Image (spheres, grey):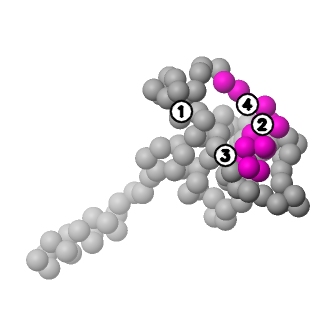
């Protein structure tokens, strides 16, 4: 039994951990969580639930920055002083484009 445990420990030590999907990648890649991480996860979730991936969201669906901000504010039940606006989402999209992330 010890031999099996040693082999398992050795294999685990060399294992490469990877996210199984883009949503998991987004929510686990940031060293500290914030509103931008939620919005990125929302983008990934919308993308993964499109018709092309057997989801229910129509092809070409593109929500406005204001809509994404409203969904985020409602989903996170943000107080007035913490709510985000369309500008926040627009800047986030721009930063993601500059990083080469769609």
The reply to whether dot 3 and dot 4 touch (C-beta < 8 Å) is no
Q: Which residue is mark 2?
A: 67
Q: Report x, y in % for residue 77.
A: 74, 57
Specify the segment rendered in magenta. 61-74
Separation of residues labelled 2 and 3 (CA atoms) = 14 Å
The reply to whether dot 4 and dot 2 touch (C-beta < 8 Å) is yes
Taking 81 as reference, is 46 above or below it?
above
Please rate how many residues cluster around mark 4, counting C-alpha atoms within 10 Å: few if below 14, some from 14 to 19, many from 20.
Answer: few
Q: Is residue 94 left or right of residue 18?
A: right
Separation of residues labelled 1 and 2 (CA atoms) = 17 Å
Taking 30 as reference, is 19 above or below it?
above
The reply to whether dot 2 and dot 3 touch (C-beta < 8 Å) is no
Mark 3 or 1: in front is 1
Q: Is residue 8 visible?
A: yes
Q: Which residue is mark 1?
A: 49
Q: Is residue 96 left or right of residue 24?
A: right
Separation of residues labelled 1 and 4 (CA atoms) = 14 Å
Q: Report x, y in % for residue 15.
A: 35, 60
Label 4: element kind: loop
Q: Which residue is mark 4?
A: 63
């Amino acid at each position: 039994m010890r031999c099996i445990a040693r082999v398992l420990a050795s294999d685990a030590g060399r294992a490469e951990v990877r996210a199984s999907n883009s949503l998991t990648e987004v929510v686990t890649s940031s060293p500290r969580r914030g509103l931008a991480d939620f919005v990125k996860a929302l983008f990934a979730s919308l993308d993964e639930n499109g018709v092309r991936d057997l989801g229910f969201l129509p092809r070409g669906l593109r929500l406005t920055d204001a809509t994404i901000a409203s969904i985020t504010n409602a989903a996170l039940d943000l107080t007035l002083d913490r709510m985000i606006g369309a500008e926040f989402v627009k800047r986030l999209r721009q930063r993601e484009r500059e990083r080469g992330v769609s």
